Amino acid sequence: MSKNNLLLTNKPADKQAFRDIVIRTVDAILDSIGDTKAYAGLSPYDLKHAIHQEYILPESGIGFDNVLADLQRQILPNFLRTSSTDYMAHLHSPALIESIAAELIIAAFNQSMDSWDQAPVATEVEVEVIRALCDLYGFGANADGVFTSGGSQSNISALFYARDWYCNAKLTHDIKKSGLPDCYRKFRIYTSAISHFSSDKGAHLMGLGYDAVVKVPTDDKMRMDATALKQLIETDVRNGNIPICVVATVGTTDYGSIDPMTDIRRLCDQYGMWMHADAAYGSAVVLSGKYAERVADLHLCDSITVDFHKMFLLPISCSVILLKDGSRFSPTELHADYLNREEDTEDGYTNLVDKSLQTTRRFDALKVWISFRMRGRDGWAEIIDTCMDNAAYLYSRLTADKSFETVTAPQISSVVFRLAASDEVNKRVRRALIHQHGVVIGQTVHAGKTYLKFTLLNPLVTHEKLDGLLELIKSLG
Ligand SMILES: Cc1ncc(COP(=O)(O)O)c(C=O)c1O
């Protein structure tokens, strides 16, 4: 085995190999972006054919030159381009340029966030970033948080902390030691009928099952109906069930709708429940210059999911779970002689694994650190306001045109609509956009009908672009 070109060491030859591979990779990326399309258009069959390789693991390595050539031929041209203004299908963002550089640093140093000795400066940076985020969401001095792999893990962690807190505080039962209490089948978690499915997955994982998740109807603005929530809780209590938590959504996946936070807080206080905000989408609105008021009630919650790989435009993965009372992270605290000794903490070494479901974990906090500091409040306000203004403009165009039907006015930056035509026509228009025009938009179902969706996370989208896309959809329809 050659000992050169293996790792990034202090040897000039290794540094040169690193520079060479990185620069040629950057050039290949840049060369692959020749047009503005979101997708080259290949069908699933053609794509399978195009990327087939006889040997993923050949007997002898083919070297970086050949691998790069294959990448350039087979993979780079067929990537979905999240930075394209023709991509607006999901809560899946383009990545800010500086955050791509941050990923290079993260990979180059490959810190692991579980223990201080695996990530000394990275640990201290994450602690600083978390402190700033707790301030940003009005959470106070006792709050704490940790980075996670995404909104699902943040939401599932919140349910886990909520369940353990409820059992400790209300039933004096320590789940960590003794497992679920006898009454666990009676636990109920409330969330709106259109919330993200991570609450169901979380309930399943925690041994409570989907039946523990009560789906609350939404009003005509696609927000949780607080009156219905109250009635469902009262019925459950009458039937001997035990309400433990409400998951409010601040930015639903399809509509960006925001649940009524003060009403939900009041009910949580009345029934002794934990209030979690799934703000995976809406958390970015806190940085808006014009619309931040829409998410000003986030501070009312016991926990918040913040996703940086959605409207904050940072690369996957990057998410945070914040708890207003940091001591409620105790369910994940577990000491191991080989990793996070108690004496470390006593001596001022922070082992972040104490707050996390993960052990090995990425240094995603660096992306926030770089991007927040580089762009500042002004830069961020411009990004968020542009996307939200675009959604308001799109909605005004749709409602003024009889060819389209809409559901509700956007609260953040996504708009659900359909051509006033059959489901089949709407579905075929979306497919034609992908394969004939390289335009990728969303599709969902509302009231049993197929709808189309623009999720506007790209601040480069203009009103003219939106007008053009609506004309194209009409002509295809
Ligand atoms: C409202 C909401 N919460 C949570 C999630 C899950 O986030 P992730 O995909 O990062 O796990 C999503 C994903 O789109 C979402 O829309």
Image (tube, grey):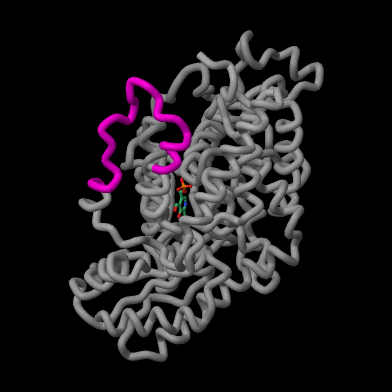
Looking at the rendering, the stretch of residues picked out in magenta corresponds to 48-69
Does residue 272 appear in this view?
Answer: no
Q: Going by the image, does 66 lie left or right of 318? A: left
Q: Nearer the viewer, residue 231 or 23?
A: 23
Residue 303 to residue 351: above or below: below
Residue 453 to residue 14: above or below: below
Residue plotted at (75% across, 66% down) = 378
Q: Going by the image, does 342 lie left or right of 56? A: right
- Return the residue found at the far right: 347
- Whole-percent x and y of residue 399? 41, 86
360 inside magenta stretch: no
Residue plotted at (28% across, 70% down) = 436
Does residue 60 appear in this view?
Answer: yes
Q: Nearer the viewer, residue 446 or 142?
A: 446
- Return the residue found at the far top: 337
- Whole-percent x and y of residue 181? 43, 25
Residue plotted at (73% across, 59% down) = 375
Quarter in which the C terminus is drawn:
bottom left
How many marks on residues? 0
Residue plotted at (30% across, 84% down) = 474
Q: Quadrant of residue 419?
A: bottom left
57 inside magenta stretch: yes
Q: Nearer the viewer, residue 210 or 464?
A: 464
